[in-house]
Amino acid sequence: MRAWIDRSSSDPLYVQVRRFVERGLRTGRFPPQRRLPSSRELAQALGVSRNTINAAYLELVALGLLVSRPRSGLYPAGASRRDPDERWPGGGLSGGRAGAARDGAAHGGAAYDGAAHGGADHGGTGHGGSVRPGTGRGDVVRPASAPDWADHVIAVDDPWPERPTIEPDYTDFPYPFLPGQVELRSFPARTWLRASTQAFDGPHRAFSLRDSVARDDPLLVDEICSTILPAKGIAATPDEVLVTNGSQQALSLLAATLLDPGRTVAVENPGYVDAARIFRRAGARLLPCPVDAHGVVIDDVADVDVAYVTPSHHHPTNVTLSPARRERLLAQAVARDFVVVEDDFDSEVRYRGSPTPAIKARDVDGRVVYLGTFSKFLAPGLRLGFLVADAALVRELRDRRYHQTKHPSGHLQRTLGLFVASGDYHRQLMRHRLDLRRKWETLGAALDAHVPWPVGEHPTGGLSYWLTGPEGFDGTVAARLARRHGVLVSPGAAYHLTPDPPRTSLRVGFNAIPQARIVPGVVRLAEAIGEATA
């Protein structure tokens, strides 16, 4: 059993023990009616201390996966079940976080399901039914009067069934090549905690704790106007700024305010599919526009009401919209009276050349709405972003936000305002840029060395590489095979908005993966690519 514990791993031993037991509950190693090994027995078997075993057992009891029977011991809380989706069943992950672990179990591959994360098996029935005595916790008797939710829920048609890889449990995989997640160790926990504590002190406490109705934190807004935006060439006043729960809320507010079934949105193709989903659910018609080496191309004769673009580093290919295209887009917007939504999610990261000023910096008419986020350089879990727009539009958006969520967390806003004002944000940004640059270089060299076709020119910035293989290569199959090896990448087809999309691309990010794992991860990715093309 000692092969299940990896002392070189960054994960605490008790976490590895907990995952070992969780997997055992699934696979039948620990049958439902049999007592689990005592802390002494399991400690000897795994080669760890009894305190480590006890800590793991306590967490499993708290999660509801184990129950304690007086004078008897610990038992599984319900019937065990086999994991239907083995993440990487073939062994041999010698370069991963728990290299010697069989089946990747020490990576937590089977530790996360509904039971461990508060699903229907965790502490309840999920819909108010009752549990039949003597059966497993998931065997629920539904009352005869229970509603049929299919008759009540408004169905939403989604024409894009394939989705990019956004794995919330990405740290369970040894090689998470994901641009939208972060490497956990990069978060500035000490300085953030200091700002968070300060946000409860003295004059800051009221801003953290009060119901601000529809207002934003004035300190954070001031820092956005005086510190964040000038670096992007944007001048704005506080009444032109709205703080949001990330860019996703900003897009939802804009869709509800600017779109209806009679209006058209120009969107990049390939592009950010979640934005397209939001616009489509508002009833708008989508006009997919092609992207070439100079960025998106919006037809001069197209009749659109809103144009949504990611000009700094196109999502997902990383192409930068050229200065000429930017000027043309602004001229089109003025001539045809449409609104430009500029989603600037990672312009701070550039490895060659100088950053291109935001389109909003050239906007003299107030028809560009600029979206910014703190997710890529702090943490997406903070859910904090902002938008900059004409004051009249911001007033309308603020009113709609109030009736949805009132305002983002006052404490998080004040913490972030203090964090930026102290200079810690920009120090973190500088450290993160250097770290990302090293990863960008390492990944580029590894892809050039191991991918069986020319990778082409490396991106000048951003958080990912866009790989396009030869005719016949299927990126969707390669991504699925790579996952079995503990490698997370996104299939390129998931970013296309038109039927029968090309399937020859992969998106390989480097924001979340530790630098030391990039090369072995690319080796395994190349093996999956080879399997997909065999």
Image (cartoon, grey):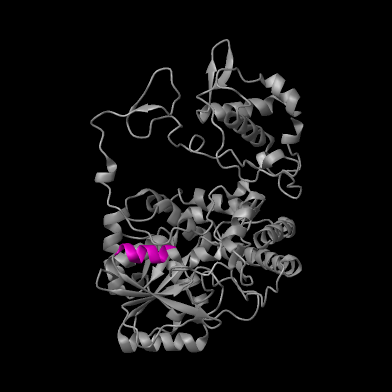
**What secondary structure is the stretch in magenta mostly built from?**
helix
**Residue 191: percent from the left, percent from the top?**
58, 54
Q: Is residue 511 left or right of residue 340?
A: right
Q: Is residue 281 above or below residue 308?
A: above
**Residue 280 placement: quadrant:** bottom left
**Residue 514: percent from the left, percent from the top?**
68, 56
Q: Is residue 241 magenta?
A: no
Please state which of residues 52 and 407 is positioned toward the viewer in this rendering: 52
**Residue 14 placement: quadrant:** top right
> Can the viewer see residue 424 in this picture?
no
Q: Is residue 274 left or right of residue 51?
A: left
**Looking at the image, which residue is at 32% across and 56% down?**
156
The image quadrant where one finds the N terminus is top right
**Residue 76: percent from the left, percent from the top?**
55, 23
The total number of labels drawn is 0
Q: Is residue 280 magenta?
A: yes
Q: Is residue 102 above or below residue 64?
A: below
The image quadrant where one finds the C terminus is bottom right
**Residue 205: percent from the left, percent from the top?**
41, 49
Region in magenta:
274-282
Farthest residue in the top direction? Answer: 71
Please state which of residues 513 and 198 is positioned toward the viewer in this rendering: 513
**Looking at the image, which residue is at 29% across and 71% down?**
258
Q: Is residue 123 left or right of residue 87?
A: left
**Residue 473 placement: quadrant:** bottom right
**Looking at the image, which residue is at 46% across and 36% down?**
118
> Can the viewer see residue 337 in this picture?
yes
